[in-house]
C-alpha cells in the first residue's frame, strides 16, 4: 500500500461533453447544482448546536402565526379558509430547498391574496359560495385560482432563468409603498362586509372599489349587531395585546400568540352560544380534514388570467426580494435575486397541484422568524409541521369560527401598511416628484383596480425619469468657509467661489437627450463658450 504522504499523479478528468459542442467540467457542474439547489450547500454544514434551538423556537412561533393568517387571507383570495392552510404548507417546504434567504417566511400575504381574489372574482362564480359551504362553487373558484397560479409559475421561472431579476429596480420605493397602501385600502373594503355581517354585490373592473363602498353604505342599516359586537371586541383584544407584545418584547420570551388565542376562544364561544343558528352570524363552515390528492391544473384559463398573473408576479417578487435583501443586509449575507424568482416559481408550481394560490414573503412572519432566533429555513420546515398537524387533526374543529374574527385579524395586520400614509408628509418635505409618483400610484390603483393601476404607476414613474433627465437642475457649487461642504451658491449666500476653479453641477446624468441643454446651461453659468474650448 502506498504511504499516506506519498504523492500519486492521477490523470485529469476530462470535461463532460454535452450536445451542440457545450463543454462542462465536473467542478462547473457542481457549482451549477449548488447554485440552483442552494440547500445542498448549507444543509450538510448545518450546526445543531448553534442553529437548532433558534430554528425550532422561531418555527413554532411562525407556525402559530400561519394558522390564523392563512385562514384569514384565504378569504381575501375569495377562497375557503382551508386553502390558506394548504398555501401555508406545500410552498414553504419547496422554498426550503431552492430559496437563498435564511429568514423570510413564505406563504400567504394580504397584498397578493387580494390580487388573487380580484382574479377569482373576475372569472369565477359569485363570492357567496362561501356562504353555506357550496362545494361546487368552491371547486369552480379553485379551478380559476390554480391556472392563475400556473401562469405566475411560468413567468417566475422564465424570468429567473433569463436573469430578469433586475426588473424590480424599475419599481421605485414610492411606487411600491403607494401601491401597497392602496391595496391595504382595498383589503379593508373587501373585509368590511364580514365585520358588519352583510352580503355585498360583487364588482370588478375600474371603479369597482367605489361601487363596493356605495353598496356597503347602503347595506349598513342591515348590519348584524351580533357580528359587529364580535368584531369590535376582537379588534380591541387584538390591538391591546399586540401593543403589549411590542412594549414588553424585551421581557417576554416570545410574543403572546393572541391571534391564535382569539381564534380558539371565539370558536368555542360561537359553538357553545350557537352564534350561527341563534344570531345569524356567518361562520367558516365545514373544513375538510386531511390532504387532498394532487390535481393537474386546468389549462383552459391560462390565457385569460395571464395579464393579471403578470401583475401578481411583479408585486409578489418585489415584496419578497425587498424583505429578503433587508434581512440579508442585517445579517451579512447575500441573496440571489434571480434564484429567488426561480424558488418562488417552483414553490408555486408544486403548490398548484395541491390547490394552493400564489405565495410571497410576509413581513410580519419574517420579522418574527428573525427576532425569535431563526438562523436558516429549517424554521420554515418546523412551521410547516405545525400547519400539517392542524390540517390533518385540528382544522375541522374551526367550523364554527365567525368570519368576522378572520376579518379583524386581517385588519390588525394591515397596521404597518396604513402607517405608510405618513409618507405623504415626508415626501412633501423631501421630494415632491416622488410624492407625485406615490399619489398617482395610490389613486390609479384605487380607481382602476390592481392590474391597470400597477401599469399606470409604472408608466408614470418612467415618465418622471424622462422628465428629470430632460429638465435637470443646474448650479454652480461654492465652498462654505470652515467646512468641507460645497453647496449651490444661489441657495446659500455664505458659499464662496474657489479662485481659479468653477464647479458646475447637473442634477441628471448626461446623455444624448440632454447633452445640448447641458452645454447651453454650462455656457450660461460659466460665461464661457464651451464649443470653442472643445
Image (tube, rainbow, N blue to C red):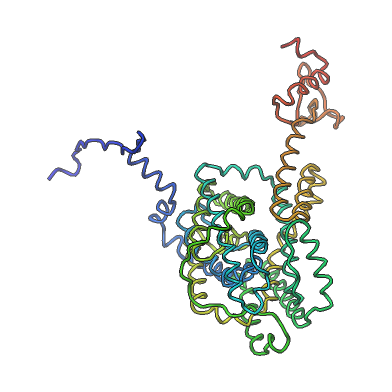
Q: Is residue 119 visible?
A: yes
- Residue 256 located left or right of residue 40: right
- When asked about the image quadrant of residue 231, the answer is bottom right
The image shows residue 518 at horizontal and vertical percentages of 76, 23
Evaluate whether residue 376 shows in this view. no
Could you tell me which residue is drawn at 69 percent across and 45 percent down?
172
Residue 501 % position (x, y): 76, 18
- Most extreme residue toward the right, as rendered? 493
The C terminus, quarter of image: top right
Residue at the top extreme of this rendering: 532
Residue 52 is situated, as x and y percent measured from the top left of the image, at: 45, 64
Is 500 on the left-hand or right-hand side of 251? right
Q: How many numbered marks, from 0 up?
A: 0
Q: In which quarter of the image is residue 200?
A: bottom right
Image quarter of residue 409 = bottom right
Front residue of 97 and 47: 97
- The N terminus lies in which quarter of the figure? top left
Residue 132 drawn above or below residue 182: below
The percent coordinates of residue 319 (x first, y second) are 62, 53
Extreme residue in the front direction: 300
- Residue sitting farthest toward the left: 1
Amino acid at each position: 500500500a502506498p504511504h499516506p504522504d506519498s504523492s500519486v499523479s492521477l490523470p485529469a478528468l476530462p470535461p463532460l461533453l454535452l450536445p451542440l459542442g457545450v463543454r462542462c467540467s465536473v467542478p462547473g457542474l457542481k457549482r451549477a447544482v449548488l447554485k440552483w439547489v442552494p440547500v445542498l450547500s448549507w444543509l450538510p454544514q448545518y450546526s445543531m448546536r448553534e442553529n437548532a434551538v433558534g430554528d425550532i423556537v422561531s418555527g413554532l412561533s411562525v407556525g402559530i402565526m400561519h394558522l390564523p393568517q392563512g385562514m384569514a387571507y384565504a378569504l381575501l383570495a375569495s377562497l375557503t379558509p382551508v386553502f390558506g392552510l394548504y398555501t401555508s404548507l406545500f410552498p414553504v417546504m419547496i422554498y426550503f430547498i431552492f430559496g437563498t434567504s435564511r429568514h423570510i417566511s413564505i406563504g400567504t400575504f394580504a397584498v397578493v391574496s387580494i390580487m388573487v381574489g380580484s382574479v377569482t372574482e373576475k372569472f369565477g362564480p359569485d363570492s357567496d359560495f362561501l356562504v353555506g359551504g357550496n362545494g361546487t362553487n368552491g371547486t369552480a373558484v379553485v379551478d380559476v385560482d390554480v391556472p392563475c397560479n400556473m401562469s405566475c409559475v411560468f413567468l417566475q421561472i422564465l424570468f429567473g432563468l433569463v436573469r430578469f431579476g433586475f426588473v424590480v429596480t424599475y419599481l421605485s420605493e414610492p411606487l411600491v409603498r403607494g401601491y401597497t397602501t392602496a391595496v391595504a385600502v382595498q383589503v379593508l373594503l373587501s373585509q368590511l362586509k364580514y365585520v358588519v355581517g352583510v352580503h355585498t354585490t360583487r364588482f370588478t373592473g375600474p371603479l369597482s372599489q367605489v361601487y363596493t363602498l356605495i353598496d356597503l353604505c347602503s347595506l349598513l342599516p342591515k348590519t348584524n349587531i351580533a357580528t359587529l359586537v364580535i368584531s369590535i371586541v376582537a379588534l380591541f383584544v387584538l390591538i391591546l395585546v399586540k401593543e403589549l407584545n411590542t412594549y414588553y418584547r424585551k421581557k417576554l420570551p416570545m410574543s403572546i400568540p393572541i391571534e391564535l388565542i382569539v381564534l380558539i376562544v371565539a370558536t368555542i364561544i360561537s359553538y357553545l352560544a350557537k352564534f350561527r343558528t341563534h344570531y345569524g352570524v356567518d361562520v367558516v363552515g365545514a373544513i375538510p380534514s386531511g390532504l387532498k390528492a394532487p390535481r393537474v391544473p386546468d389549462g383552459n384559463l391560462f390565457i385569460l388570467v395571464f395579464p393579471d398573473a403578470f401583475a401578481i408576479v411583479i408585486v409578489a417578487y418585489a415584496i419578497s426580494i425587498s424583505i429578503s435583501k433587508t434581512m440579508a443586509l442585517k445579517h451579512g449575507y447575500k441573496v440571489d435575486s434571480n434564484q429567488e424568482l426561480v424558488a418562488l416559481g417552483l414553490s408555486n408550481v408544486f403548490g398548484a397541484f395541491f390547490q394552493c394560490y400564489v405565495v410571497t414573503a410576509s413581513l410580519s412572519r419574517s420579522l418574527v422568524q428573525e427576532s425569535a432566533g431563526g438562523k436558516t429555513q429549517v424554521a420554515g420546515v418546523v412551521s410547516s409541521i405545525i400547519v400539517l398537524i392542524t390540517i390533518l387533526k385540528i382544522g375541522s374543529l374551526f367550523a364554527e369560527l365567525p368570519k368576522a374574527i378572520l376579518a379583524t385579524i386581517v385588519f390588525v395586520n394591515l397596521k404597518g401598511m396604513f402607517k405608510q400614509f405618513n409618507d405623504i408628509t415626508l415626501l412633501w418635505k423631501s421630494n415632491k416628484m416622488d410624492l407625485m409618483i406615490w399619489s398617482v400610484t395610490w389613486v390609479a390603483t384605487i380607481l382602476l383596480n390592481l392590474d391597470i393601476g400597477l401599469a399606470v404607476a409604472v408608466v408614470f414613474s418612467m415618465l418622471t425619469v424622462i422628465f428629470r433627465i430632460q429638465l435637470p437642475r443646474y448650479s454652480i457649487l461654492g465652498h462654505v468657509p470652515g467646512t468641507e461642504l460645497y453647496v449651490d451658491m444661489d441657495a446659500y449666500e455664505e458659499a464662496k467661489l474657489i479662485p481659479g476653479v468653477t464647479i458646475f453641477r447637473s442634477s441628471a446624468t448626461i446623455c444624448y437627450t440632454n447633452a445640448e441643454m447641458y452645454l447651453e446651461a454650462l455656457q450660461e453659468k460659466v460665461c464661457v463658450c464651451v464649443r470653442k474650448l472643445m
